[in-house]
Amino acid sequence: MSPKALKSISIAATSAAMALLVAGCSAGDTTSGTSAQTAETTPVDDQRLRGQSLALTCSGCHGGGGAAVPDYRHLDRDLLEARLLAYREDANGKTVMHRLMRGYDEADISAVAAYLTTPGDG
């Protein structure tokens, strides 16, 4: 895939993530709707959606089969979560991964790892 195509995919993924975040932040009070209009979600659904939204940034670099950037799809959840937490905790790390993970809390990292290691997702 050409660098231009990868950049377009990355921009689209980032735009989609931002749209999801904005939509979630601006949803307002949804308690006034009737039960038929309001879809109920479970904590598992919420974590999956959160992980999906946050993981959009990962697809810009990972999963493309290139040798320079590791593919996360072969990792299990615990290993992926541990690696992401290690990036976040490394105070001297200066890579893009270190910088990105410092913006995530433990719940975010757990949600991303869960989403990316669920068969059929990520």
Image (tube, helix red, strand yellow):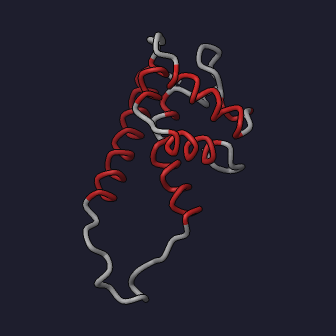
On screen, residue 73 above or below 94: below
Task: Point out the image quarter for the C terminus.
Answer: top right
Q: 77 and 64: which one is in front?
A: 77
- Residue at 60% from the left image edge and 47% from the top image edge: 115
Within the image, what quadrant is residue 71 found in? Answer: top right
- Residue at 47% from the left image edge and 20% from the top image edge: 98
Q: 63 and 108: which one is in front?
A: 108
Left or right: where does residue 111 sit relative to residue 70? left
On screen, residue 36 above or below 5: below
Q: Position of residue 1 (x, y in %)?
A: 53, 24
Q: Position of residue 83 (x, y in %)?
A: 63, 26
- Residue at 73% from the left image edge and 33% from the top image edge: 75
- Residue at 55% from the left image edge and 64% from the top image edge: 43
Q: Position of residue 29 (x, y in %)?
A: 27, 73
Q: Position of residue 94 (x, y in %)?
A: 44, 11
Q: How many marks?
A: 0
Within the image, what quadrant is residue 117 found in? Answer: top right
Q: 84 and 16: which one is in front?
A: 84
On screen, residue 118 above or below 105: below
Left or right: where does residue 71 sit relative to residue 58? right
Within the image, what quadrant is residue 4 found in? Answer: top left
